[in-house]
Structures are given as structure tokens and as C-alpha cells.
Image (tube, grey):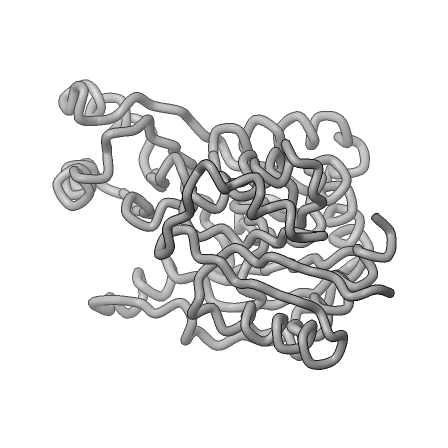
Amino acid sequence: MSKKAVLFCGKTEDVLIKQIITHLKDEYNFYVELHNPNMFSLALSEYNQFINKFDLVVGKVNGLSTLDVLHSAKINYIPAINQFDSVYNCTNRICLDNILRKVFSKYERVLNNYFLPKSWLHPSPLKNINKFNQWASTKLPLVFKSHLQHNDFFRFNFLARKPEEIGDFVVNYKDALYFDLYIQEFIECDGFDRKIYVVGDKIFGIKRENPIYIYLRDKPESIDVEMIKREPFELSENIKQLAQILSKELNLDIFGFDLVKPIKREGYVLLDLNDFPGFKGIDNIDKVIANYIIDYLERV
């Protein structure tokens, strides 16, 4: 293989990205740049010229500016992991919810042991707080989530079980509520997340305590999710099949999703899906991803 040039788009302090870059540079002699679009400016007149230096763009979304880089790759026909349309669908929770429901309907017989939570799109509570309180009070408990899940300034995940907690949510997050709101029913589960990670045809499983259940039990002032203990989770063939379906239908090469086991029904509920997650707890994942990038470039 001739020397390849790869552009990583993401946080400059991201340890996983740094490790992947080290493998590509030291073991495969790739030319690699790491661009953080939230920290470094780029003249728009030079955008297309800049992107055309590379054989591949890898986006680990850091705010919406990463989407701009992936879009430039798309219109300049530069291969990308993951591609612009797929990442945009993951970034926007409403788009993602709609696609997942379509996928679950298409594969209803195959995925009869998996479910999606009830969910709603609601106008910003700031438009009419009283009306929002009345509506939400009839559907508690609810989990309020930011419409865009890759916006560091307006990202939240808030559980409301009592009517007064709806008001707490509006007060605490008023500066982040200038958008439509994505809302899920709260799923009572066994207290654990099953995090499924996918890199090409390789699938990994990690089990950890659910942060909401940690809060309900211990009432800590804050929870560092990175510090929650993780352990390997043995994947059934059905979960592997779900991962393969999601990869195909969402056109994602590298992604992860969260399953919880509800206490009131059999099977699993899929709560979240993310393009290029952190892969916390997976041994040698940097090497796995670096090898996948090599294989990907040999195919395109």
C-alpha cells in the first residue's frame, strides 16, 4: 500500500484518537493530521483544498463543526468513517428515533425481543411553561434529552419522576432549552446498561451500572460516568444480529448502542445509539480501530 493520508476530526485531547494515530504513524507510516474544528479556524476559501489532501476522513464528533468537515469530505468524494449523512442522523435525536423505528418495523420478526421506548418531540418548554408542565405531568416518569446529542453547550439528560421535578428541569437547563425537546419514557430496568460496541464486523459488549440508578440509590452530588466500573458482557447471537442490522441500515462502520433489561417485560430496550463512542473498557480497541482503518482503505 502506498503512503496514505488520514484526517482525524475530533478533540485534540482524546486519548483514544491519539493512540489510533500513533499506530497509523508508527506501524503503517501513514501521514495523519488531527483537526479540532472547535479550537482551530480554517479559511472557508481553502476548505475544499484542505480536505482534498487526504485519502480518508475519520470523524469522532466534537460539536457540530465536525459535521462541516464530514460534509466537505462528502461533496469532494473523500471516503469517511463514518459518513456525513450517517453521523448527522446520530447527532439529531429526532432523526435517529425516526430511523430506528423504521428499522425495528422492517425487521419486526427478527427483532421481536427488542423494543424502543415511547418518545415525544415537544416544542421548547420556554414557549409555554404552564402548558409544558401540564403535558409532562400526565406522562411521568420522563427523561428529558437534548435534541442534539453532540452539542457540548446544550447537552443534558434529566429524569423527572414528580411534577415539581419538571419545574426543576426548566430552571436548571433554561439556557439550553431554545430548541425542540426530545423526551423518552423512563424504563424501569435491572439497573445496568449493556453497552454494545461495533467496529466493522467486530462486536464487543460491556456491562456497567446505570448512572440514573446510581443517583437514585446514592444521591451523589455528581457522577463521573468514566469512573463507573465496567465488565465484559457476553453477547448473544440475537444481539450480534441486532448490531449487524443497525450497521447496515444506518450505514455506520464504527458505533455503539445501549440496551437495558426492563423489569416489566422480557427482552431489551434500546435507549441510545452513538457514532464513534469512547469504547471505555474494551482492551486494545485502539489497535482494533487502526486495523479497521487499514482494511477500509484497501477496499475503497
- Judged left or right of residue 201, residue 150 is left
Q: Is residue 109 above or below residue 1?
A: above
Residue 149 seen in the figure:
no
* Residue 224: x %, y % from top left: 34, 70
* Residue in the picture at 70% in, 57% down: 198
* Residue in the picture at 49% in, 51% down: 61
- Judged left or right of residue 288, residue 178 is left
Give the position of the N terminus as an image quadrant: bottom right
* Residue 46: x %, y % from top left: 49, 42
In the foreground, 45 or 229: 45
- Judged left or right of residue 147, residue 235 is right
When asked about the image quadrant of residue 110, the answer is top right
Q: Is residue 267 above or below residue 202?
A: above
* Residue 100: x %, y % from top left: 62, 33
* Residue 9: x %, y % from top left: 52, 55
Q: Is residue 285 above or below residue 139?
A: below
Residue 80 seen in the figure:
yes
* Residue in the picture at 19% in, 18% down: 131
In the foreground, 3 or 119: 3
Q: Is residue 18 above or below residue 171?
A: below
In the foreground, 189 or 31: 31
- Judged left or right of residue 30, residue 149 is left
Numbered circles on residues, count? 0
When asked about the image quadrant of residue 180, the answer is top left
